[in-house]
Image (spheres, rainbow, N blue to C red):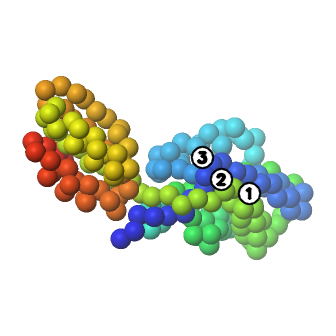
Amino acid sequence: MSSEFRTLAGPCESIVREKMSRFLAFARPVSSAAEAREWIASVANEYHDARHVCWAYMLGASGSEFQWSDNGEPSGTAGKPILGQIRSKELTNVAIAVVRYFGGIKLGTSGLIAAYRQAACQALEAGEIITDWEMGQVSFTFPYLAMNSVMRMVRDSQARITEQQFDNTCSMTLAIRADRADDLASRIAKIDGTSLLQ
């Protein structure tokens, strides 16, 4: 299974005006549900005077984890259209929050769906889309004498060291693309004296 996915390179935004209502859309890359919710809460806090802050996020290379909220708008008129734009652009690890300032004219169900969809779409189109990978990690111990072999393998595998400790018995944790983690672990296990950690 590929761990490759498409996501945003960084934050982006757009503004849509519809019958005097303003829809401020903000999109950004996120790596967890906790990060997405924390960011959405910060947007809601910043625009506390807005009538609605509707949102959606999608996570994981397969897009299997997602959530949305209509935040007081009629059911299905805001969060679902926002999520639909993330899906239609085949993105994941993305959160979108759309802030609505009511302009005094009701838009109706179809008008709301169209406005939230357009706001989310324009925010995503304003951003740069990149290819990224789900990351896995490999943790292991090794004797100090195996340092050269270990460091050569780290360099050749293009893994990133996230933790390391050097002593008589050394330990290291590497971050690497999830689809390459098992192969790296089996190669590390072949170095004399190494021991993989769970």
Residue 175 locus on image (x, y percent): 35, 47
Asked if the residue at tag 1 contacts the one at tag 3, i.e. Cβ–Cβ closer than 8 Å, the answer is no
Q: Nearer the viewer, mark 1 or mark 2?
A: 1
Residue type indicated by callout 3? Ile
Q: Nearer the viewer, mark 3 or mark 2?
A: 2
Q: Going from the N terminus, do you reach mark 3 or mark 2 first?
A: 2
* Distance from Cα at disc 1 to Cα at disc 2: 9 Å
**Residue placed furthest toward the left:** 193
Residue highlighted by disc 3: 40
For label 1, the crowd category at 10 Å Cα-Cα, with few meaning under 14, some 14 to 19 and many 20 or more, is: some
Q: Is residue 112 visible?
A: no
Residue highlighted by disc 1: 126
Residue type indicated by callout 2? Ala
Secondary structure under the numbered disc 1 in the rendered image: helix
For label 2, the crowd category at 10 Å Cα-Cα, with few meaning under 14, some 14 to 19 and many 20 or more, is: many
Residue 12 locus on image (x, y percent): 70, 51
Residue 4 locus on image (x, y percent): 45, 64
Residue highlighted by disc 2: 27
* Distance from Cα at disc 3 to Cα at disc 1: 19 Å
Secondary structure under the numbered disc 3 in the rendered image: helix
Residue 140, placed above or below residue 88: above
From the viewer's perspective, is 125 left or right of 84? Answer: right
Secondary structure under the numbered disc 2 in the rendered image: strand
* Distance from Cα at disc 3 to Cα at disc 2: 10 Å
Residue type indicated by callout 1? Ala
Q: Nearer the viewer, residue 157 or 42?
A: 157
Residue at image location 76% in from the left, 70% down from the top: 114
Residue 191 locus on image (x, y percent): 15, 47
Q: Nearer the viewer, residue 78 or 181?
A: 181
Q: Nearer the viewer, mark 3 or mark 1?
A: 1
Q: Name which quarter of the figure residue 7 lies in.
A: bottom right
From the viewer's perspective, is 129 left or right of 155? Answer: right
